[in-house]
Image: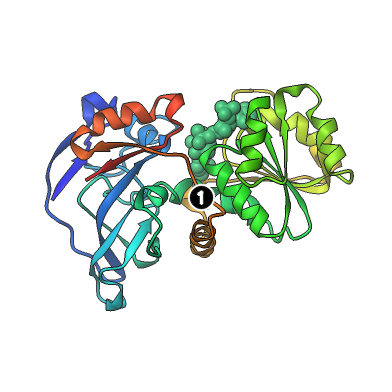
Amino acid sequence: MRAAWYERNGPARDVLTVGELPTPSPAPGEVRVRVAVSAVHRCDTRKRRGTSGSVMRFPRIIPHDDGAGVIDAVGRGVDARRLGQRVWVYLAQSYRPFGTAAEYTVVPDPQAVALPAGVPFDQVAGLGRPGITGHRAILGDGTVVGQTVVVTGALGSVGRSSLAVGRRAGATVIAAVRQDAQVARALAAGAHHAVDLASGRVARRILELAPGGVHRVADCAFADNLATWLETLAYGGTIATYANGRSRAPVPFRSLAVKNVTVHFLGNDDFPDDANHAAAVDLTAALCAGDLCFPKVRSFALDDIVEAHEAAEQPATRGRVVVTP
Ligand SMILES: NC(=O)c1ccc[n+]([C@@H]2O[C@H](COP(=O)([O-])OP(=O)(O)OC[C@H]3O[C@@H](n4cnc5c(N)ncnc54)[C@H](OP(=O)(O)O)[C@@H]3O)[C@@H](O)[C@H]2O)c1
């Protein structure tokens, strides 16, 4: 099969190779997917660069965790009726050597999620990592029915997923964006309310919307935004966070303790399987209902994977980059 791989960490141009590799066969409990679209997330480019603590766990790595395509072979123990099914795939290269940047990828059966007709592959190819993270940020600490949740980075991939999951799960969702011009877009993306974190009066505005305080925050920049949550969280509230932001301020232990705040640090490679499966079901339903959609992606041929990785590393693309094997 045609595939892209690297055998050492480094810049895309120095380490990525495209060529022929043996087509993999599914082991018991696995399915093989003929990949239509393979997503390039920034965590894929960080793993390839060897930054953020990434190391070469295997001598050769086919990159990319997420993708979409059609099941064309099943291993022993997998329902043969899955053959021919359209699917989206998550965490293909998490703790495994071979991801989706190839004509074929092999994943455990539950990590290939059935995709109803009509949902285009490029809408779901990049869903796995951000979608499942956004889902867990909202629901990883129990029900949000009747609660108020704040979602930062609401127009990003994780944030859009959190907005959709929160709204569908019965919460009142306040999107927190960083520019006034994004407020209308966040409302259009599904938020009940939207506030501008940079306005200088964001805490007051959130407390006007949630006078008893916010129950849960799904936050993309823990250290940058913590002061706002200390002002606006209800007693016993939860901050679920999946990235730190730029601030290096010390953790204000006493202020968090006084409010009995739960801080849930999320690492998507290590969520429990049942949380991943529940997220996959909910996210697929949200997509099919039209409650979750993502901006258009930039698409590259597999042969141009170097350019695809370089594009994904640019802030402007927001990681919405795919390759088509
Ligand atoms: N821990 C995990 O398992 C996990 C999983 C998935 C993603 N992540 C990480 O989470 C981050 C977001 O991922 P993504 O896919 O959603 O990225 P994305 O699509 O690029 O969106 C990032 C969003 O975060 C906003 N943002 C950035 N810094 C902010 C800050 N200090 N305060 C408030 N908002 C801020 C951006 O707003 P602007 O429009 O104003 O720039 C944008 O809306 C990335 O660093 C990614 O690597 C971690």
Q: Which residue is mark 1?
A: 131
Of the pair 80 and 199, the residue shown nearer to us: 199
Q: How is the image coloured?
A: rainbow
Q: Secondary structure at mark 1?
A: helix
- Of the four image quadrants, the one with ligand 1 is top right
Q: Position of residue 195 (x, y in %)?
A: 73, 33
How crowded is the residue under tag 1: few (<14 C-alpha within 10 Å), some, or many (20+)? many
Name the outermost residue toward the right: 211
Residue 6, quarter of the rendered image:
top left
Q: Position of residue 1 (x, y in %)?
A: 13, 51
Vertical relation: 85 (above or below) 132 = below
The residue positioned 32% from the left and 31% from the top of the image is 309
| Ligand 1 contact, mark 1 (Cβ < 8 Å) | no
Total of numbered circles in the picture?
Answer: 1
The correct choice, above or below, for 29 with respect to 21 in the image is below
Q: Which residue is located at x 57 percent, y 44 percent? A: 160
Give 177 or 26, whichever is nearer the viewer.
177
Q: Quadrant of residue 105?
A: bottom left
Percent of width and height locating residue 298: 35, 35
Question: Can residue 254 be seen here?
Answer: no
Q: Which residue is at a point 41% across and 51% down the rendered structure image?
A: 124
Asked if residue 51 shows in the view, the reply is yes
Point out residue 204 in the picture as x, y percentages from the top left corner.
85, 31
Residue kind at label 1, given as amino acid type: Gly
Q: Is residue 141 left or right of residue 205?
A: left
Residue displayed at 51% across by 41% down: 157
